[in-house]
Image: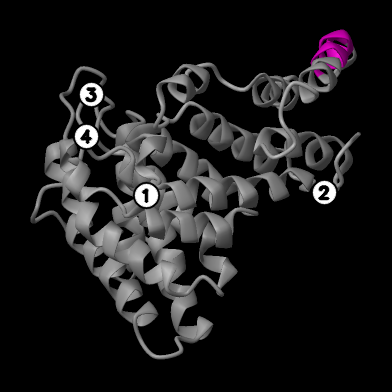
């Protein structure tokens, strides 16, 4: 690596900033260099933009092949992993440079949702975009996000990013049709054996339950999170150890109590069969 560093320049561009952000390459009192690391002309910024653009172009081609996508997807993942750690939490302005390339990348991915191996890339991209301050006109379209959720919802990394973005942008970004389609997709994921898939599906459903409704009575109702969703989230977030068995039993009993309070045509009513029994049947 030392004698042939030019052959590993791009890898070093990713490794060195991580070491720097951890304080390994500078005295503790030295000021942060994130502005220099992510400046418009910095090697990292240029290389990241080129990588995002290259993957976007490949995905925009006719019938893109995974052999062409894979190396670019791996390199894109590395940049998406390191970029958030470069600026301090109090200053996300340097990340603004990547907003448009990332939105273009997500647009290209949304047109290739048959390639499920792009799900993690989409999640990482959404996580990074959620840290970039943007006006409503600069947000990802709700239709595109809905398409991605339906296609990639079974991937925990994607759901993590989708949750971060919706939490930042607001669930009121979705139209009426999307507020039906997204819950339908997320509820079906509650049968997953992966805890993070169940947990983040519930968290997104919770955000949707709080979304602003059209009528005053629905607004009051929507401001109170669904008890079913809240109890299920507590089940997912409670460690499975003997000392917690009493709490877990209490949350599960609460699911049964709250189940009967919802009308049969509500999506809250459908959560229990999927979440507790892994099936779509309803309890009478």
Q: Say if mark 3 contacts mark 1, CB within 8 Å.
A: no
**Mark 4 / mark 1, whichever is N-terminal:** 1
The Cα–Cα distance between marks 3 and 1, rounded to whole angstroms, is: 22 Å
**Mark 3 / mark 1, whichever is N-terminal:** 1
Left/right of residue 183 with respect to residue 145 in the rendered view:
right
Q: Residues within 10 Å of mark 4 (few under 14, many from 20)?
A: some
Residue at image coords 31%, 46%: 129
Residue range of the region highlighted in magenta in the rendering: 243-251
The Cα–Cα distance between marks 4 and 1, rounded to whole angstroms, is: 20 Å
The Cα–Cα distance between marks 4 and 2, rounded to whole angstroms, is: 43 Å
**Where residue 61 sits: x, y (%)?**
35, 87
Mark nearest the camera among 4 and 2 is 2
Relative to 14, is 164 above or below?
above
**Where residue 254 sits: x, y (%)?**
80, 15
Which residue has dot 2 on it?
Answer: 280
Which residue has dot 3 on it?
Answer: 90
**Mark 3 / mark 2, whichever is N-terminal:** 3
Element under label 1? helix
Which residue has dot 1 on it?
Answer: 15
Residue situated in front as seen by the camera: 171 or 235: 171
**Mark 4 / mark 2, whichever is N-terminal:** 4
Relative to 266, is 110 above or below?
below
Which residue has dot 4 on it?
Answer: 92
**Label placed on residue 101:** none
Element under label 3? loop
Q: Residue furthest bottom?
A: 62
Residue at image coords 89%, 40%: 277
Mark nearest the camera among 4 and 1 is 4
Q: Residues within 10 Å of mark 1 (few under 14, many from 20)?
A: few
């Amino acid at each position: 690596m030392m004698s042939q560093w030019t052959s590993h320049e791009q890898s070093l561009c990713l490794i060195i900033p991580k070491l720097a952000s951890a304080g390994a390459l500078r005295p503790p009192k030295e000021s942060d260099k994130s502005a220099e690391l992510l400046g418009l002309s910095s090697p990292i910024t240029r290389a990241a933009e080129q990588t995002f653009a290259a993957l976007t172009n490949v995905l925009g081609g006719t019938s893109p092949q995974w052999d062409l996508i894979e190396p670019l997807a791996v390199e894109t993942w590395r940049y998406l992993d390191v970029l958030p750690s470069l600026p301090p939490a109090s200053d996300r302005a340097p990340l603004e440079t990547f907003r448009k390339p990332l939105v273009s990348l997500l647009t290209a991915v949304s047109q290739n949702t048959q390639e499920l191996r792009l799900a993690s890339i989409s999640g990482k991209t959404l996580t990074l975009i959620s840290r970039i301050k943007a006006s409503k006109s600069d947000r990802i379209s709700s239709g595109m996000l809905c398409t991605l959720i339906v296609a990639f919802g079974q991937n925990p990394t994607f759901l993590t990013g989708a949750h971060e973005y919706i939490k930042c942008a607001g669930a009121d970004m979705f139209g009426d049709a999307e507020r039906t389609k997204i819950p339908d997709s997320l509820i079906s994921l509650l049968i997953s054996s992966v805890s993070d898939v169940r947990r983040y599906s519930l968290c997104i459903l919770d955000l949707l339950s709080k979304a602003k409704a059209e009528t005053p009575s629905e607004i009051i109702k929507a401001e109170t999170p669904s008890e079913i969703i809240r109890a299920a989230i507590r089940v997912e977030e409670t460690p499975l150890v003997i000392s917690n068995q009493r709490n877990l039993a209490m949350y599960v009993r609460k699911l049964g109590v709250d189940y009967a309070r919802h009308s049969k045509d509500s999506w809250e009513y459908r959560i229990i069969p999927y979440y507790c029994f892994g099936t779509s049947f309803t309890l009478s």
